[in-house]
Image (cartoon, coloured by chain):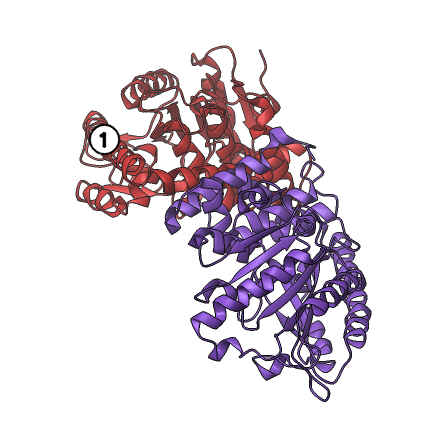
Chain colours: A red, B purple
Amino acid sequence: MVMRIDDLARQPGEWLRGTGPDNDIVMSSRIRLARNLAGRPFLTVASHKVRAELEVQIRGALDQVNLGAARMYVSLKEASAVDRQFLMERHLISRDLLNAEGDRGVAIAKEETVAIMVNEEDHLRLQVLRSGLQLHEAWKEIDRIDDELSTRLPMAFHAQFGYLTACPTNAGTGMRISVLLHLPALVMTRQIDKVFQALSRISFSVRGLYGEGTQATGNFYQISNQATLGKSEQKLIDDLSNVVPEIVKFERHCREKLANEQKTALEDRVMRACGTLRYARTISSEETMELLSAIRLGSHLSLLPDIAPRTINELFISTQPGHLQKHEGRPLSPQERDLARAGFIRGKLSEKLKNSP
Amino acid sequence: MVMRIDDLARQPGEWLRGTGPDNDIVMSSRIRLARNLAGRPFLTVASHKVRAELEVQIRGALDQVNLGAARMYVSLKEASAVDRQFLMERHLISRDLLNAEGDRGVAIAKEETVAIMVNEEDHLRLQVLRSGLQLHEAWKEIDRIDDELSTRLPMAFHAQFGYLTACPTNAGTGMRISVLLHLPALVMTRQIDKVFQALSRISFSVRGLYGEGTQATGNFYQISNQATLGKSEQKLIDDLSNVVPEIVKFERHCREKLANEQKTALEDRVMRACGTLRYARTISSEETMELLSAIRLGSHLSLLPDIAPRTINELFISTQPGHLQKHEGRPLSPQERDLARAGFIRGKLSEKLKNSP
């Protein structure tokens, strides 16, 4: 089966369905490995010719790796700006791969749980992305793919430094693990700073929905390891797997506290957000994220039985600029996007769709 | 038929039905006459005994005046605080009559179009209140009642100064005429100051929904004459009757301009107001007025076909504190009122009631 980007637009992948463990708080778990081919220059110094050769060589190896039937390869050199934006919003390519020039691409497979970027900052960036808290499962999968690829491609590895990467901050394991958490109650009760401090002590960093330099809109926080060197992959996964349940517990505690002690204010906030999303005629991305955050919380507190949690999860991503333009089938000005966004949301949250899946 | 305050609570009077001419902009027309009995002291210096005698004498005369079958007299000395607040919000008694002490009351008749206050600032305050622009009709009615009363009560009248009143600012005609206008488009397009200036030049003053000293919440403006001396009743009525259509024309022009040039922003504002009113769980009186103002505008621009204009008119009054407490049948704290208000509005604006009258 040949998959295309339009198929992704029609059918959200596994992580957006939000079915994984602790999905009321853990939106997704992600592991990414940076790899480079031995004997080939880093991309920072590679010529166009080398870059083209690398893509061909790596695609050849990828074709032989078991990634299931429903897989696709997108050449980003050929992809439209809207498609590239779409893939970035879907967390299938990085901002670096979007903005880079020349031959580069991404292999996408297994309902978007697997994405392998070619010619990003490193020759290869392997990613496994799962809904809910599934770091161990993600590790098992990415380790298998890494092993299979390593039998077909000679990876640059140094006995002392581990995997060699274009930027030294990624050397060693070449691994970045992260979880995307939805923490509205910790924000509302002003406890979120405590979480930041605790994470910083064990060398995990906190970022927004779209990684480095992005704002934590919609009360989404991406927690990931800072160092790739000095800790084994298993140790990193164990550390994050141990700390996330603590944060989940803390967020759940604050949600209960809010539901008990500020019931009316909470319900009012959730229902007003619902009213605005169902009625607005034009709405910015920022306001959308804030309001969706409120109704996501309300949904998990059973305040909105007529809206499926999956619908809310999908809206966070499908109301982003690239997704909207993909949906409308043409580039849109910011004003047009705000109109299209409001219309799209009204359609998805229409009261007529009550109790639809 | 004996009417009671509870009957008024169940069935809003003529002016709230909003059926009068130019009712998209002119909420109501009102004329009030101040009268005192000759040979009796003004209330500022009247003893409790005199006050009591006055009420008995005036009620006796009122009983003989033709005010139709469905009439009532409310003794405000005996009325509860909630009932007094209710009558004030309904524009059937003044704030002065609400706050005064001792024997006093109000006769209410003809679907609330007639209200005759006894022992307010003056011995008698006659009021005729009609929906839409009906100053001439209101004058005809109040003049007839005044004539009938004058044959039964000796009114204090001076050949040079006209009717004598407790406060000299009311002497002469003793008449205050006013129209209550809804001017959201003039506010949105920042043209409202022009109206104020023009009115001030012809000696008309502008106040809020509940008269002197009240804010113009909900974009409602009450326009009334400043002087009661030096102009005949007919001249005052003619002056206001001539200026109001000009303001109406200006407001309609601005509404059209908004609808044409800022269609999306206007629709967005109206629909968001609708969404918030339909979903909020707690809401203040001030926010309610602002949002109702937006949906009243939207309704008259045919943006909200599923909400009857009458429903919106009634909500302005029925969401006031006294009305809410009357509806709930008990005194409510401000917090309880905000909850009750939100619930009441949701009930009235429920989408299930689509196209109901």
Give x and y (percent) for residue B325.
45, 46
**Residue under numbered circle 1:** A249
Label 1: few (<14), some or many (≥20) within 10 Å? Answer: few
Where on the picture, by quarter, is residue B9? top right
The answer to whether residue A182 shows anywhere in this view is yes
Subunit ID for the residue under disc 1: A
> Picture coordinates of residue A108 (x, y %)?
49, 22
| Residue B61 locus on image (x, y percent) | 64, 62
Say above or below: B50 vs B279: below
Q: Is residue A239 left or right of residue B207?
A: left
Front residue of B158 and A270? B158
The residue positioned farthest toward the bottom in the image shown: B160
Position of A117 compared to A244: left or right? right
Q: Quadrant of the C terminus of chain B?
A: top right
Percent x, y for residue A242?
19, 28
Pick the front one: A123 or A39: A123
Placement of A126 over or under B34, stated as above or below: above
Q: What amino acid does circle 1 point to?
A: Lys
Above or below B324: residue A10: above
Q: What is the quadrant of the N terminus of chain B in the image?
A: top right
Q: Who's the residue at 71% across and 78% down the image?
A: B173
Whether residue A32 is visible to the viewer of this picture, yes or no, is no
